[in-house]
Image: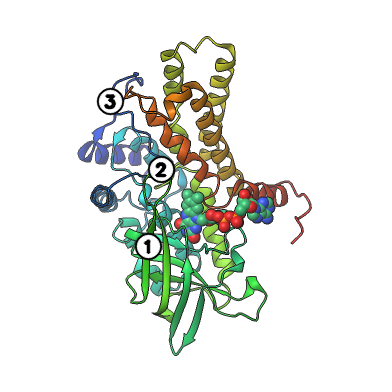
Amino acid sequence: MTPTLAEFCDAARAFLDANAERAFAGEFIWGIGSDEITVYAEKSAADEQAAVRAAQQWRAKMWESGFGWITGPLAYGGRGLDPEYERIYLDLEAGYQVPSQTMFGSSLGVVAPTILAHGSEWLKDQYLARLHRGDVLACQLLSEPEAGSDLASLSTRATADGDEWVINGQKVWSSRAHFSDIGLLLARTDFEAPKHQGITAFIYPLDTPGTDVRPLRQMTGGAEFNEVFFDGARISDRYRVGDVNAGWSVFRTSLQSERASIGSRGAGYGGSGLAGLAAPQKVVQLAQQFGLADDPVVRQDLARLYTGYRLVEWNANRRPPLAPAATKYGTARHMNWAASMIARLLGPRICADTGEWGTYAWKQLLLGACAIRIGGGTDEVMKNGVGEAVLGLPKEPR
Ligand SMILES: Cc1cc2nc3c(=O)[nH]c(=O)nc-3n(C[C@H](O)[C@H](O)[C@H](O)COP(=O)(O)OP(=O)(O)OC[C@H]3O[C@@H](n4cnc5c(N)ncnc54)[C@H](O)[C@@H]3O)c2cc1C
């Protein structure tokens, strides 16, 4: 029976009370607690593994108590409830200290919705529940050295051999592939067809022999990205998602899911979660700390920060949701503006560590925010999308 919103809320609160500590509910106070600001992780391999384990344990608890896939179809283990129930759960969970869920960004924001929309019954049975339970982690194997914004130019090849596919080629910028179990792979299956029509999608088990995952270190210090090489790797046709040469429509689902989730509040991303890294109350105290809070230009900037923060938050809660390209672009734009404003407040303290609490720590936002403009599609490509699909402007020449 469908619970009422009030019943659901009581059950969610009881679950959170029993399993997690309450988050500090008071006002942010300058100098108290950790000043860490993380956009992209800067962890050792051991710390990263511990964070993944903690996140998986939390998702397993959510799953066992019926909060692991609130909106998912009953047939695949979900609760079959409206998005309003999920919003309530996320609002409540935000009041508790739970392990970071960022590693599930691709699993739940992209790969699971793609399997649900285009996968065979075998793929759905095999993966949907395990992805939401956190047992299986997924990444995206899309971009290549010569195919980013123009992804349809990709050249990783999948060649049919009986009921198997032989994969050869290279992917790059594959976030979290080094600890993922599977990846959503796009590969070229027809080199003669127009480029969008010769691509097929697969769910690729990363332990397939012939796969080499090599981490890439980024300027924030961490190594979340990878290059992935395929050298004669063989996978069964069961792992194909959608029809042969119909991979582009599969990809369009995954792309819309990713862009929407970057600006949303779902597991792994959290548009309002991202914006919360530069929450106005923190930045106001930063300005006060350096005697800048009465400066008229700084006050204008603080008002703009607050406005941008609220817009990101409201857009994340919109029903029906805003166009994914607009949500993603709005979040990226706000985060980059916030990072540059905070850098102006801090001056040299953001690039030389004086040891002072709450100063140099902001460098992670400054270095990490620019990646939000690129991952999931660049700002320019988002603007093209909004211009064409939302505003009905003429299409760019292709
Ligand atoms: C944080 C992050 C995470 C990522 N995670 C993944 C992942 O998990 N898996 C994966 O496969 N990839 C991932 N990527 C790669 C990402 O999808 C690509 O970097 C992105 O699509 C841009 O491609 P590119 O880097 O090749 O740049 P290019 O496409 O070469 O673009 C270069 C410049 O040209 C501009 N440009 C290109 N085309 C147009 C156009 N038509 N109109 C106007 N301007 C244009 C771009 O805006 C950009 O400024 C990630 C990237 C980042 C930063």
Residue at point 41%, 14% (across, down): 289
Tell me where residue 144 appears, x and y as whole percent.
52, 64
Tell me where residue 2 appears, x and y as whole percent.
38, 49
Quarter of the image where ligand 1 sits: bottom right
Image mark for residue 334: none
Measured in 3D between alpha carbons, the distance from the residue under mark 2 to the one under mark 3, in whole angstroms, is: 22 Å
Asked if the residues shown at circle 2 and circle 3 are in contact, with their CB atoms under 8 angstroms apart, the answer is: no
Residue 88 visible (yes or no): yes
Residue at point 37%, 65% (across, down): 213
- Most extreme residue toward the bottom is 162
Image mark for residue 214: 1
Secondary structure, mark 2, is loop
The residue that label 2 is drawn on is 220
Tell me where residue 123 appears, x and y as whole percent.
40, 71
Secondary structure, mark 1, is strand
> Residue 276 vs residue 132: left or right?
right
Q: Is residue 6 above or below residue 378?
A: above
Tag nearer the camera, 1 or 3: 1
At label 2, the amino acid type is: Thr
Q: Is residue 4 above or below residue 338?
A: below
**Along the line of sight, the residue nearer the viewer: 329 or 19:** 329
Measured in 3D between alpha carbons, the distance from the residue under mark 2 to the one under mark 1, in whole angstroms, is: 18 Å
Q: Is residue 221 above or below residue 139?
A: above
Return the disc, 1 or 3, that comes first in the chain's sequence. Answer: 3
> Residue 286 vs residue 98: left or right?
right
Q: Quadrant of residue 73?
A: bottom left
Q: Quadrant of the C terminus?
A: bottom right
Measured in 3D between alpha carbons, the distance from the residue under mark 1 to the one under mark 3, in whole angstroms, is: 35 Å
- Label 1 C-beta lies within 8 Å of the nearest ligand 1 atom: no
At label 1, the amino acid type is: Arg
At label 3, the amino acid type is: Gly
